[in-house]
Amino acid sequence: FDDARYVDAEQLCTRALRIKEELTPGDGLRIAAMLNFLADVHSVQARYGKAELLYKRAIAIWRDVNANDGYFALGYGNLAVLYNEQHRFPEAEAYHKKALARLETNPDKNDPYLATILENLGSLYRKAGRAADAELLLLRANTIHENTVGPHHEDIARGLLNLAHVYVDQGKMDDAKSLYDRSLNILVNRFGTDHDLVAECFRGLGVIHVRYRKYDEARQYFEKALTSYEKVMGVNHPQ
């Protein structure tokens, strides 16, 4: 459903799920995967109640068929994101931790999905004002990215950006500026200036220069951020 044809995706997946359950009810792994996919379709349309029920059905099936930890990590991670979208932060934290516990059993410590869970939980802690906890998780996530993708990959840039935000919260302006600059360099070389993460870097650098009391430079960065946001989102976007 990458092209946002959510209605078509929902109808096709619901039909396929019904056929699968009728013809091969014992194929739990595939049925659970289809439930999980259908939950994703509902989630991106903000149908959180339906999505939650489907995610939990998938998890229940994985439990019945004694699926491996990776399936449970996926299901718990999806529920955590769902709860975070609804600002149900205690539940989001609990399910991120459940996903993390499952992934920690994997001997592969460079699992990209482990990095995703670490980043999501780190972002949650940052929102809660737990900057030190967020920093530790984001550093772990960045190490995984460094070990699994090239030095100029978007995941590296995003990880540096997330960590820079935490350093701003902690008042570590020089550290934050260094990470914003590194992230910006990667992103501009890959995407040019018309990208939402580029705009976020410009905005972060603007905040830092306000803290430095370098207001002319701060204004220039904010103007660059605004230009990038307008090109990506349109001039009438609420952000």
Image: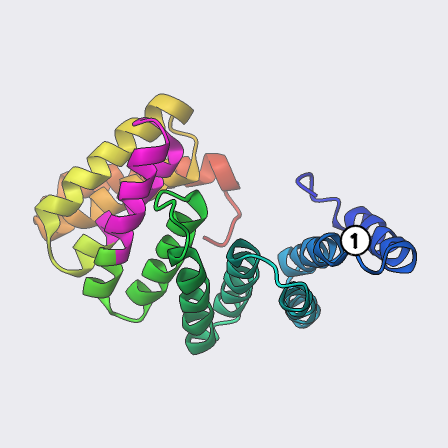
Q: Which segment did they paint magenta?
A: 137-165
Residue sitting at x 48%, y 67%: 84
The prevailing secondary structure element of the residues shown in magenta is helix
- Above or below residue 231? Residue 101 is below
View extreme (top): residue: 189
Task: Name the spot of residue 137 as percent of width and height, x first.
Answer: 28, 56
Task: Name the spot of residue 207 as percent of width and height, x first.
Answer: 20, 50
Q: Is residue 140 magenta?
A: yes
Residue sitting at x 64%, y 63%: 46
Apparent side of residue 169 relative to residue 200 in the rendered image (left or right): left
Q: 126 or 208, which lies in front? A: 126
In this figure, which colouring scheme has been used for the structure?
rainbow
Which amino acid type is marked by label 1?
Glu
Question: Mark 1, residues whose alpha carbon is within 10 Å: few (<14), some, or many (≥20)?
Answer: some
Viewer can see residue 182: yes
Task: Name the spot of residue 79 as percent of width and height, x first.
Answer: 55, 66
Residue sitting at x 48%, y 75%: 88
- Above or below residue 63? Residue 149 is above
Q: 52 or 171, which lies in front? A: 52
> What residue does disc 1 label?
10
Apparent side of residue 72 relative to residue 161 in the rendered image (left or right): right
Viewer can see residue 162: no
